[in-house]
Image: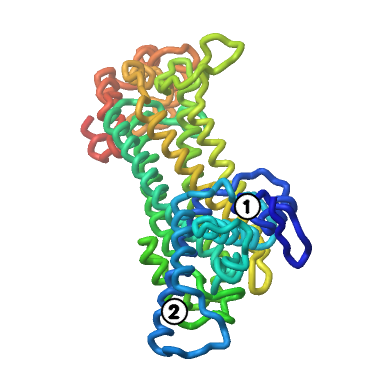
Amino acid sequence: MRIESDFIGERQIPKNALWGIHSLRAKENFPDNTAFHKEWYMAIGIVKQACYKTYLGFLTGINSKFPDQEFPFQLLDKNLLEELDEVASEINLGEHFEHFIVPAIQGGAGTSMNMNVNEIIANRALQKAGENCGDYKKIDPFEHANVFQSTNDVIPTSLKVTAIRLLQKLEESINNLRLQVENTESKYRNVLRIGYTQMQAAVPSSYDKLFSTYNNALSRDWWRVSKCFERIKEVNLGGGAIGTGLSIPRFFIMEVVPNLRRLTGLPITRSENLSDATANQDGFVEVHATLKAHAVNLEKMAADLRLLASDLFKNREVQLPKMQVGSSIMPGKVNPVIPEFVISSAHKVYANDILISNLSGQGCLELNAYLPSIGHALLDSIKLLIAANHALAQNLFKELLIESGLTEENVINNPSVATALSPYIGYHQAAKLAKEMKNKNISIVEANQILNVIEPSKLKSLIEPEELLKLGYRIGDTINR
């Protein structure tokens, strides 16, 4: 064991642990096991890389402009900065994550997250230099790993880097799902089905029309997600504690975000108002509103298919792929687990939306102390939606089947088909046919044989699939027929 101290007191730390006293206090103070998003941890690494590279540029500039000049502050050694940069790059690759012990749900605006990474960087750099972990006189988490940084600019900036990276994956997942939906739409083009309103048979329709509604909704989702980058591309890195840049060199403030942009390849820019970018989190509220809209569309799609494939339909046309055994007691039962997973995910997104909105409103004066919870919920939603899109694309639409042999018969035998006759025989006569069909459980042809409300040859032509599926009717059709 080793002994570490802060101004509160001393604690024992395992000898080779890369975390230190500040991480330990956080773990003890926040006794929660909610796992921190590794992607956010990795992004903190690349943000710190940008800081170290900027300091190296700052150091080069000072040595060039002020050779042999003494300053009232101590400059960091070039070799030390390169060692810190090397460890930060390891964090960006996801290394040493087992030493990140701070839970996702925490207090303190992210200071514990920042310090946990600072301690990992300092101790790993000590290890690489052949020194003992905890020997902070040589490499210090505050003076060195956190140089020219604040929790209040590193943590929100790294959150935006993480969110943009994941939003790119979400875009891709939406497009993959769109492709599968389009394939299904094409496969079942002009295959008749009964359209429903308020869970009651309404009018004849087709499966490609149903799937086209999903496809269009996903297109809107893709467009909205593609605009999210604009809402969170401005960062406050270099702004320090409250966005005023106090105690930070102007060179650093001006250069650190361009360095981060080069490192990440992301369209990140420095906010024109660093104080605003530090204090206000409405950008995350706006982005999550887009995520919620996508979740709504996924839920609607999944709920529709779950219903259509259920045993509540006597002549079930929609067959979901059989993914797993559905019961531990009922033999042969297969449940619609993919739609249920998607619906559950959507409702978690809705819950996250309320949390993000409420906690963003809890920002107080210059800072929002709840950024860790806001960020966790945001990343949670993006990853859930990526998973939901993948599940629908690969585990449902890819093997979805429509029993097309049943569809036309089901439509012709359903009283809703009488609506197609209204322009030619009027609402009341069509209603008589529908009532006769329903009361005697007979087809429209049989009902018309009893009631004789329309010429049989005319009826036959009006209930042909191409007639039922065409967009509206022309006035001349009612005269010439």
Q: What residue type is labelled 1?
A: Ile
Lateral position of residue 107 relative to residue 174, left or right: right
Q: Earlier in the sequence, mark 2 or mark 1?
A: 2
Q: Taking the image as drawn, is residue 26 in sight?
A: no
Q: Quadrant of the C terminus?
A: top left
Q: In this view, does 462 lie above or below 56?
A: above
Q: Which residue lies furthest to the left in this view?
A: 480
Q: Residue at position x 54%, y 41% from top?
A: 346
Q: Which amino acid does label 2 sit on?
A: Leu
Q: Distance between the residues labelled 2 and 1?
A: 46 Å
Q: Helix, strand, or loop for circle 1? A: helix
Residue at (37, 29) in percent of width and height: 204
Of the two numbered discs 2 and 1 in the rendering, the one whose residue sits closer to the viewer: 2
Number of numbered discs overlaid on the protein picture: 2
Q: How crowded is mark 2: few (under 14 residues within 10 Å), some or many (20 or more)?
A: some
Along the line of sight, the residue nearer the viewer: 1 or 219: 1
Residue 155 sits in quarter: bottom right
| Residue at (35, 22) in percent of width and height | 402
Percent coordinates x, y for residue 399 in the rendering = 36, 25
Q: Which of 440 and 432 is in front in this view?
A: 440
Percent from the top left, x then y, of residue 282? 56, 64
Q: Say which residue label 1 marks.
A: 354
Is there any visible trace of residue 329 in the rendered image? yes
Is residue 405 placed above or below 211 in the rendered structure?
A: above
* Residue 148 place in picture, x, y as percent: 54, 74
Query: Which picture quadrant has residue 61?
Result: bottom left
- Seen from the viewer's position, the closer of residues 121 and 2 is 2
- Furthest toward the right, the residue is 9
Q: Where is residue 178 in the image (x, y as percent from the top left)?
A: 35, 41
Mark 2 — residue? Answer: 59
Q: Residue furthest front?
A: 130
